Image (cartoon, grey):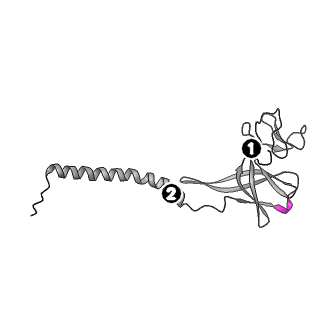
Amino acid sequence: MSNNRVSRRQFLSYTIMGVGGFMASSMLMPMVRFAVDPVLQVSADGDYVVTDQLASELSEVPIRVSFTYTQEDAWYTSEVTNDAWVYLEGEEIVALSPVCKHLGCTVTWEGSADFPEQFFCPCHAGRYYKNGENVAGTPPLGPLDQFLVEVRDGYVALGPLRPNFLVS
């Protein structure tokens, strides 16, 4: 037997500290994982999505290009299909979002016979010039957003949406 006997009070103190430490660490570990996990994730290939549109077939007339990508939200994975209006401006490829800045309706190129050479939103008669700039006096208060664009193996690749940088 040892001469260092543990009293009931010390035993209870050690037990409470041990259980409290275990409970604190079990609450802290998920928080640490939540904070560190995004840093450890492998990033995608620059977040660009290659479309089926050949860059060589583009012209100065905007065309609707559909593209699909995989989206992961926590534990749910889904296929999302989006559109973009893509055209050539000189040698540069321009891709604009089809989402109206007024209420989120879908704009169409030359959607109204009264307004040729403009994007038209049928919901509230919103209009945009070809570069995405909103026509003054119509409901939209801002220009259409713009996709970053690259050409990969001859096909148009669309990146993340950014505020329109054609309109200053």
Residue 80 in the figure: left or right of residue 118: left
Q: Residue at x 44, y 51 (%)?
A: 31
Q: Which stretch did the figure color magenta?
A: 55-63
Give the image location of residue 116, x and y in percent: 90, 42
Residue 154 on the magenta segment: no
Residue 101 in the figure: left or right of residue 75: right
Taking depth in this image into account, of 68 and 91 the one nearest to the observer is 91
Q: Which amino acid lies under the numbered mark 1 shown in the image of this protein?
A: Val
Q: Residue furthest top?
A: 137
Give the image location of residue 70, x and y in percent: 64, 57
Taking depth in this image into account, of 44 and 122 the one nearest to the observer is 44
State the quadrant of the C terminus: top right
User: First in sequence: mark 2 or mark 1?
Assistant: 2
State the quadrant of the N terminus: bottom left
Q: Which residue is mark 2?
A: 37
Q: Which residue is mark 1?
A: 99
